[in-house]
Image (cartoon, helix red, strand yellow):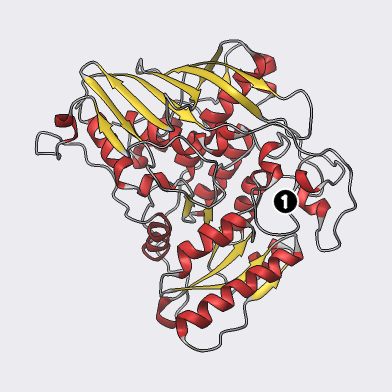
Amino acid sequence: MTTRRNFIKQTLAAGAGMIVAPTIVPASVFGKNAPSNRINIGAIGAGRISRGHDMPGVWRFDEVRIVAVADVDMNRAVDGGKLVEEHYTKKLGSPYSGVKVYQDYEEILANKDVDAVLISTPDHWHAKNAIDAVHAGKDVYLQKPTSLTVEEGRLMSNAVNATGRIFQIGSQQRSMPQFRVACELVRNGRIGQLKSVEIRLPGDPAGGSTAEMPVPANLNYDKWLGPTPNVYYTEERVHPQKGYGRPGWLRCEQFGAGMITGWGVHHFDIAHWAMDTEYSGPVEISGKAEFATGGLWNVHGPYETEMLYANGVVVSGVTESKEKPNGLLFTGAEGWIFVSRGNYSASASDPISARSEALKASDPKILSPLTDNDPVRLYVSSDHHGNWLECVKSRRLNITPAEVAHRSCSVCLLQHIAMKLGRKLYWNPITERFTNDDEANVMLARPSRPPYNF
């Protein structure tokens, strides 16, 4: 069985030479004089996910203070600072002020009072933000996905492991009990030998206005574009200037791969957990998808993918439907297990999905509690943000560290490449390269625009 501790040793012994071994430092990040070992947090990104999910996910813990907020849209940065102060004023019962507000995230990283950061920026900034943060000595909670390319994800994971920072990816399904239970049941053989996993994801609509617009004075648009190419501003390419609705960048390939990473990272991470392939990946990938031919938004629409893993399990992806509701279907020689989020939503603007029971099986007996005959027990976390904070204090390994996060993202990016190329691809999960396919290997990376280079 591959464990978190022996994965890197095994990989290096195999000659990959790509992974930097982690250094788990025992020293506290807080300093001797920190009141009650309080964790001071800076929020990088103050949009809908930060306001509705990540900042509330940490500020409810008494040992935490959000002390700084940064956003390239200064209106959002100021609004985020006010939101934090209003929360603490209500929580503490007296006026609270003094939250630092910045437009540049580098100022949070330079702030010696900040111990850790929440990164809730658009996908195209994730890897760069995280790399800069760990090199600045900050622990990181990063919204998924980790990266836009496999190369960026590799750089990010290496940076985290080299610096010994505590890194949690926002794949909160790991901390939802039904997903852990489903994985334990699969790994303990409750459905017999695992044959296949079907993963059902939502889609994104085409459309979006292409009309060029003046850049708002409150937005540093050049920095918002970051390492991606320079293109003209239009509001539906970025985020709403009024309110915190679902932003248009989620539907533009320049900034994200669409639902295959946006939702896929969650579900493929669970598939890896159930198969004990968290530090590996598929060996064959094929896929097809519909892509928009007009309008601003150009991420994939309805899609189908299929991957073969070295253990013989076939993992497929498909657009969800009424007949195939959002979630994962594990099929074995002796039955099946289906698991989903049930009625849970991370934010009010999440896509509306076909809902289903959180956990069900072909035979109710499959779901009976584990016994001594079921030896596999997985990492238990009852709260994803809380698990990160606990590990920031203890310096123990958290439930979804950087290499696991990179592998669950890279498997989604491989499917996206297969969708684009429309042919079967052969993958080496040790070298992280396609076998004898130069065109596909070129797609594992892309140039980054100065001065925001990796």
Estimate how packed mark 1 is, as few (under 14), some (14 to 19) or many (20 or more) residues with alpha carbons within 10 Å.
Answer: many
Residue 8: % across, % down: 42, 37
Which residue sits at x=60%, y=83%? 97
Q: Nearer the viewer, residue 139 or 50?
A: 50
Instruction: Tell whether 175 sits left or right of 111.
Output: left
Residue extending farthest to the front is: 322
Total number of numbered discs in the rendering: 1
Q: Residue 313, how many percent across, how many down?
A: 36, 18
- Residue 218 vs residue 313, the one in the foreground: 218
What secondary structure is found at the residue carrying circle 1? loop
Up-down: is 198 above or below 404? above
User: Measuring 54% from the left and 46% from the top, which residue is drawn there?
Assistant: 350
Q: Residue furthest bottom?
A: 94
In the depicted view, which residue is nearer to us: 60 or 184? 60
- Quadrant where the C terminus sits is top right
Determine whether, in the image, residue 47 is placed left or right of residue 168: right
Residue 134 is at least partly visible in this image? no
Identify which residue, 404 or 212, lies in the foreground. Answer: 212
According to the picture, the residue beneath numbered tag 1 turns out to be 239
Question: Residue 238: x, y in percent?
Answer: 75, 48
Question: Which residue is painted at 62% across and 22% down in the image?
Answer: 417
- Residue 172 horizontal/vertical position (percent): 43, 48
166 in relation to 204, above or below: below
Q: Is residue 97 left or right of residue 180?
A: right
Q: Which quadrant of the figure has residue 10?
A: top left
Q: Quadrant of the N terminus?
A: top left
Tell me if I can see residue 447 in this picture. Answer: yes
Instruction: Determine whether 15 is above or below 166 in the image.
Output: above
Look at label 1 and name its amino acid: His
Q: Residue furthest left?
A: 372
